[in-house]
Amino acid sequence: MKRAAHIVVVGKENVGKTAVVVRYLTGRYLSEYAHAPEMTYERIVPVDGRQVPLKITDISGKSLETKASNKDFLSKVDGIVVVYAINDTPSYHVAEGVCNWVRRDRKSPVHTPILLLGNKADLSHCRCVPSPDTDETQWTNSSCLATEVSASTQPDHINYVFTSLINKILERREATLKPRKMSQNPLGSPKVIRATIKRRFSVFTRERTSTM
Ligand SMILES: Nc1nc2c(ncn2[C@@H]2O[C@H](COP(=O)(O)OP(=O)(O)OP(=O)(O)O)[C@@H](O)[C@H]2O)c(=O)[nH]1
């Protein structure tokens, strides 16, 4: 894949967006993170034996509204990670709002995969948002996977959900590329077609020659 898969991470302030991204890309959990309005990371990541160019844009909670009002922004990306914290009800409502907004926006490709992450699952004793029914078939049915994670204590699960999102993006790309290639040239290039005709014709000539 030449063009990087572009994933944007959004959500309310302090839900752990940077923690989730840093955990996925570096395997580390730092507990304190710089609050830049926007950070973009570009990496080549291993995904099920493939080396995939990846671009992740982490948008701070504060600049979410500015970006959301830019109608083109989320509609151009390949995948969206919407984060809330399971101990923060308003953050869940913000996440819900973003998902609805993406779905309603006519410029968005209908099936842009969305990963809805309830972060801080290690704080389940302070939970105020019900846990989602996580089911892998959600990807097939709605292009949205809702699950809970903890950037603090579940590095493998963070890795798993990002890998699964990237796989979904690659799947969609392959699905949209294949029909176009076929319709451009169902039989191959003109050179290939000429060579095939010549080969067939030469067999015919050989057969005729050998019977003479
Ligand atoms: N207990 C717990 N704390 C977490 C977890 N993930 C992040 N935090 C903490 O939550 C706070 C905010 O994390 P950030 O990653 O800066 O959150 P953010 O959503 O990027 O914040 P903004 O940049 O303000 O939008 C930090 O103090 C983190 O240590 C987690 O899984 N569990």
Image (cartoon, rainbow, N blue to C red):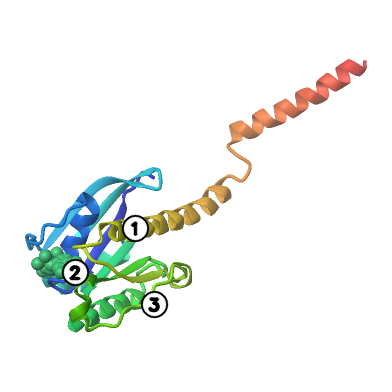
Residue 44, above or below 204:
below
Q: Which residue is mark 2?
A: 67
As drawn, the residue found furthest toward the front would be: 125
Residue ID at (48%, 68%): 140
Picture quadrant where residue 37 is located: bottom left
Q: Is residue 28 above or below residue 136?
A: above
**Residues at marks 2 and 3, CA–CA distance in whole angstroms:** 30 Å
Q: Which residue is mark 3?
A: 133
Pointer 1 local density, CA inside 10 Å: few below 14, some 14–19, many at least 20: some
Q: Quadrant of the C terminus?
A: top right
Q: Which residue is mark 1?
A: 160
Whole-percent x and y of residue 41?
20, 51
**Does residue 27 appear left or right of residue 78 in this picture?**
left
x, y percent for residue 143: 42, 69
Q: Nearer the viewer, mark 2 or mark 1?
A: 1
Helix or strand or loop: what does disc 1 sit on?
A: helix
Provide the secondary structure element on which disc 3 rests: loop
First in sequence, mark 2 or 3: give its number: 2
27 and 76: which is toward the camera: 27
Q: Earlier in the sequence, mark 3 or mark 1?
A: 3
